[in-house]
Image (cartoon, rainbow, N blue to C red):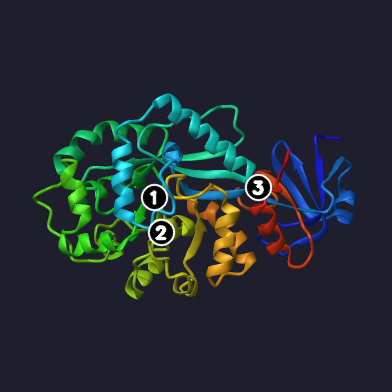
């Protein structure tokens, strides 16, 4: 048998090419060797055939942005419809964490993602990760830097920097929670270690107000937690323009949300080859606007998907993000599946994932196809959790 396995199904959905009817994927040692019609595969490979019948086999989903740590906040009532009220609640609740329960709920969140077809995720954290070793999921941890007041940022810098050097990716929380000098230091460190940076950008109108005037509810939150810096002078720029002026934006930066942006911001994102991660259901539950999907799409910006956390979403099912956008945005089902797979791999810098092609990792799921458009049927099956992992 030479260690090969052949996985056959009514449809193979490679993402990077059209679906293959009565197709098969050949796998050896966890990597894909060939993707083709079953009639062609059986001519070339003598191997055990595992038949998934009336299903479509596709790559596992890639959730570019979530916060496993916040799974313990799923008790916050939703829909919240008030971003700053929600933010106050999150900051307050984080002061009283039961570490044992927090760890347990993180594991449950990982199980939920696996049960809904996610095989890769970007996890934004405030503490170093300790993931369970028995979960078959690839997690790329991003350790978030927070420190708007310069003295506070300096206190935190050394330990945070050492963690980045050792094992995690850097993240900046947001333009309103990190001192500008330390945003630049974070990005310089990321470049030195060839790592991605994730940052929440232009999520709310309050964020824009703060960067224009240094006033509003975000300032009040900073003051109440002894994080305000009296030396701060508002840049009087949009969040995107502000980050660009600091040299933060390049092709290794993931901008999450990108809601309150204008045409000039979109042009900056395009020129800097930024990946934008959309979290539409989280935005809806927090009463935020939605990203200018059509203009981002027209500009050719790479769009990926995230669920954000259980503190701001009903669940962590990425298929439901696709369904939401299918109903509310100008994306085809095919484009949405690409956003949840291949584009997620591009955003996270994992180019051997998110597609079915020779050399890619064989992280695959199978879903029933009931007829009609294949991509639409896949999304509908995923929303119903009719998912089986291809082992």
Quarter of the picture containing the N terminus is top right
Left/right of residue 233 with respect to residue 49 in the rendered view: left
Estimate the spatial distance between the alpha carbons at disc 1 and disc 3, rounded to whole Å: 24 Å
Q: Position of residue 119 (x, y in %)?
A: 60, 43
> Disc 2 designates what residue?
257
> Disc 1 designates what residue?
198
Indicate the quadrant where residue 375 lies: bottom right
Left/right of residue 374 with respect to residue 259 in the rendered view: right
- Between circles 1 and 2, the one closer to the viewer is 2
Query: Along the polypeptide, which appears first: circle 1 or circle 3?
Result: 1
Residue 73 in the image: above or below residue 174 = above
Q: Position of residue 167 (x, y in %)?
A: 42, 33
Q: Could you tell me which secondary element the residue under label 1 belongs to?
A: strand
Give the mark count.
Answer: 3
Front in this rendered view, residue 335 or 272: 335
- Between circles 3 and 2, the one closer to the viewer is 2
Q: Residue furthest top?
A: 100
Q: Could you tell me which secondary element the residue under label 2 belongs to?
A: strand
Instruction: Rate crowding at label 2 as few (under 14), some (14 to 19) or many (20 or more) other CA atoms within 10 Å.
Output: many
Front in this rendered view, residue 82 or 122: 82
> Disc 3 designates what residue?
360
């Amino acid at each position: 048998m030479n260690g090969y396995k052949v996985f056959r199904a009514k449809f193979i959905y490679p993402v990077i090419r059209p679906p293959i009817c009565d197709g098969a994927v050949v796998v050896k040692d966890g990597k894909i060797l060939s993707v083709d019609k079953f009639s062609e595969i059986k001519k070339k490979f003598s191997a055990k055939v595992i038949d998934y019948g009336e299903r479509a086999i596709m790559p596992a989903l890639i959730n570019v942005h979530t916060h496993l740590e916040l799974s313990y906040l799923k008790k916050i009532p939703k829909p919240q419809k008030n971003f700053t009220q929600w933010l106050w609640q999150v900051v307050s609740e984080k002061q009283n964490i039961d570490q044992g329960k927090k760890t347990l709920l993180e594991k449950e969140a990982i199980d939920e993602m696996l049960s809904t077809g996610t095989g890769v995720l970007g996890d934004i954290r405030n503490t170093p990760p300790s993931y369970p070793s028995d979960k078959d999921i690839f997690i790329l941890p991003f350790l978030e830097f927070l420190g708007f007041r310069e003295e506070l940022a300096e206190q935190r810098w050394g330990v945070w920097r050492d963690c980045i050097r050792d094992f995690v990716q850097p993240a900046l929380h947001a333009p309103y929670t990190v001192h500008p000098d330390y945003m630049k230091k974070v990005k310089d460190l990321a470049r030195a270690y060839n790592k991605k940076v994730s940052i929440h950008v232009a999520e709310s109108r309050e964020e824009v107000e703060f960067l224009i005037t240094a006033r509003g509810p975000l300032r009040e939150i900073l003051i109440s937690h002894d994080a305000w810096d009296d030396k701060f002078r508002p840049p009087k720029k949009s969040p995107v323009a502000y980050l660009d002026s600091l040299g933060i934006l390049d092709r290794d930066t993931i901008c999450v949300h990108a809601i309150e942006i204008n045409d000039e911001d979109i042009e900056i994102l395009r020129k800097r080859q930024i990946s934008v991660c959309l979290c539409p259901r989280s935005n809806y539950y927090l009463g935020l606007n939605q990203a200018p999907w059509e203009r981002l799409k027209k500009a050719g910006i790479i769009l990926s998907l995230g669920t954000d956390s259980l503190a701001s979403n009903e669940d962590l099912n990425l298929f439901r993000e696709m369904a939401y956008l299918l109903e509310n945005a100008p994306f085809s089902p095919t484009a949405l599946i690409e956003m949840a797979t291949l584009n997620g791999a591009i955003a996270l810098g994992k180019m051997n994932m998110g597609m079915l092609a020779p050399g890619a990792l064989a992280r695959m799921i199978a879903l029933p196809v009931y007829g009609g458009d294949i991509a639409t049927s896949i999304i509908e099956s995923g929303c119903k959790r009719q998912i089986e992992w291809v082992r």
